Image (cartoon, helix red, strand yellow):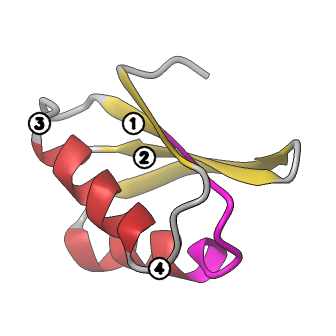
């Protein structure tokens, strides 16, 4: 999947992956996509919840090499 910005939050624990994603998304233009990589097991709950509550679209989520990779579209 194509993306406009990339942030690796591997090694960060709650709530840092969400806070870092929020900061990166604020800098994007509407329609752009952030790829976020996280290793915090709680991120599988936190990131989808953050997207729903903040009005971002969680386009895709998958596992890769022990990490979760999220593609989040800004609206």
Asked if residue 24 is positioned above or below residue 66 in the image, the reply reads above
Q: Which quadrant of the figure has residue 44? A: bottom right
Contact (Cβ within 8 Å) of mark 3 with mark 4: no
Q: Residue 72 carries which label?
A: 2
Visible in this render: residue 75?
Answer: no
Comparing 31 with 13, the one in front is 13
The quadrant where residue 16 appears = bottom left
Query: Of callouts 3 and 4, which one flags the residue occurring earlier in the amino acid sequence?
Result: 4
Q: Which residue is drawn at 16% across and 32% down?
A: 28
For label 1, the residue is: 34
Identity of the residue drawn at 28% across and 80% down: 53
Earlier-in-chain disc, 1 versus 4: 4
Q: Image point 37% across, 32% down: which residue?
A: 33
Image position, residue 52 (x, y; %): 36, 75
Say whether marks 2 and 1 touch (CB < 8 Å).
yes
Task: Select label 2 or label 4 by which is in front.
Answer: 4
Name the quarter where the N terminus is drawn: top right
Q: Which secondary structure, mark 3?
A: loop
Q: Is residue 71 visible?
A: yes
Q: Mark 4 points at which residue?
A: 14
Range drawn in magenta: 36-45
């Amino acid at each position: 999947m194509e993306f406009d910005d990339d942030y690796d939050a591997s090694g960060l624990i709650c709530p840092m992956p969400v806070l870092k994603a929020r900061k990166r998304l604020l800098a994007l233009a509407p329609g752009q996509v952030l790829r976020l990589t996280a290793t915090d097991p709680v991120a599988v709950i936190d990131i989808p919840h953050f997207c729903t509550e903040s009005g971002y679209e969680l386009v895709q989520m998958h596992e890769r090499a022990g990490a979760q990779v999220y593609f989040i579209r800004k609206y």
